[in-house]
């Protein structure tokens, strides 16, 4: 209960302080857009780390060195918790935009943060709007901004982390059209933070593992035609191994 109250208080305070911060960052961005991007990313990362600390979340991080530091990438992330953005944003070396579902656009302040961080809101029921979002994300990658997306399309409520939903192949157009590396990001145990006992936050261990980069230009056959299925198999293998790790630690 105490963790839950502290997290809520921190979020409220941060959202209030964000309003004048947005104005300052907007002014900085008029002349130095890259400096604005970096400063907003670092502030967001610091806040995410604080929330994870207060929530009692201990992160076991694996494979971060596999993220290229000199080029944008497409992060492909499995989605089990509201905390998944926090768990992955803290590891991004450069500006990264998250593609979230359209409902997030209705959340005050959070929608502004995601927009300032090059994020987009996807309506999968509107194919024309969804295509525009993917095209905008492609432009972001061409301009040096990484993109993070949850290809399952929604938060996975299945019992086990390894019970992945099918990946939407359209998500991978961002990589195939730009040639940027695909970085599989497998999160194990994040639903234990909140979702398994909502609305209470509990301390737990979470594994975040980054897989080897998948280069679209080197894929052939079915891996090229069904890249989503190929990356899903990679992620499933990682999740299976880390499920054993979390069981051994419990």
Image (spheres, rainbow, N blue to C red):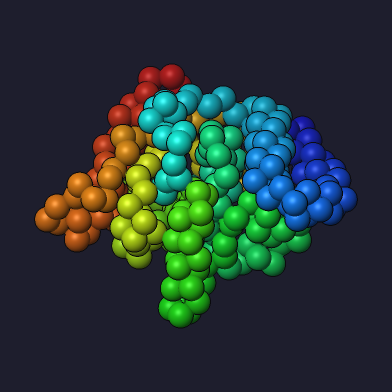
- How many circles with numbers are drawn on the protein? 0
In this rendering, would 7 be left or right of 198? right
Residue 69, above or below 165: above
In the rendered image, the quadrant that contains the C terminus is: top left
Q: Nearer the viewer, residue 32 or 103?
A: 32
Residue at image coords 48%, 73%: 132
Residue 31, above or below 48: below
Does the rendering let one see residue 28? yes
Residue at image coords 68%, 54%: 116
Residue at image coords 77%, 32%: 2
- In the rendering, at what x and y percent does residue 181 appear? 35, 45
In the rendered image, the quadrant that contains the N terminus is: top right
Does the rendering let one see residue 152? no
Residue at image coords 48%, 24%: 60
Q: Nearer the viewer, residue 33 or 212?
A: 33
Q: Nearer the viewer, residue 71 or 90?
A: 71
Q: Quadrant of residue 213?
A: top left
- In the rendering, at what x and y percent does residue 31 appear? 75, 51
In this rendering, would 163 be left or right of 130? left
Task: Specify the farthest residue to the left.
Answer: 221
- In the rendering, at what x and y percent does residue 239 appear? 34, 36
In this rendering, would 74 be left or right of 27? left
- In the rendering, at what x and y percent does residue 66 appear? 38, 30
């Amino acid at each position: 209960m105490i963790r839950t109250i502290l997290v809520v208080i921190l979020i409220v305070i941060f959202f209030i302080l964000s309003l004048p911060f947005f104005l300052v960052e907007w002014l900085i961005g008029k002349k130095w857009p890259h400096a604005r991007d970096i400063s907003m990313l670092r502030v967001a990362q610091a806040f995410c780390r604080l929330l994870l600390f207060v929530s009692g979340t201990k992160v076991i991080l694996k494979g971060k060195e596999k993220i290229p530091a000199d080029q944008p990438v497409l992060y492909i992330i499995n989605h089990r918790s509201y905390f998944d953005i926090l768990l992955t944003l803290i590891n991004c070396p450069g500006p990264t935009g998250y593609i979230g579902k359209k409902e997030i656009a209705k959340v005050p302040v959070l929608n502004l943060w995601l927009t300032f961080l090059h994020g987009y809101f996807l309506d999968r029921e509107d194919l024309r709007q969804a295509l525009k979002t993917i095209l905008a994300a492609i432009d972001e990658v061409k301009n040096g901004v990484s993109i993070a997306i949850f290809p399952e399309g929604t938060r996975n409520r299945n019992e086990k982390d390894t019970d992945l939903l099918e990946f939407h192949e359209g998500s991978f157009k961002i990589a195939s059209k730009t040639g940027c590396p695909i970085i599989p990001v497998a999160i194990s145990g994040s639903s234990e933070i909140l979702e398994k006992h909502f609305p209470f936050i509990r301390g737990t261990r979470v594994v975040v593992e980054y897989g080897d980069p998948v280069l679209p230009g080197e894929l052939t056959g079915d891996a090229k035609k069904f890249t989503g299925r190929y990356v899903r198999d990679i992620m499933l293998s990682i999740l299976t191994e880390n499920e054993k790790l979390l069981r051994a630690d419990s």
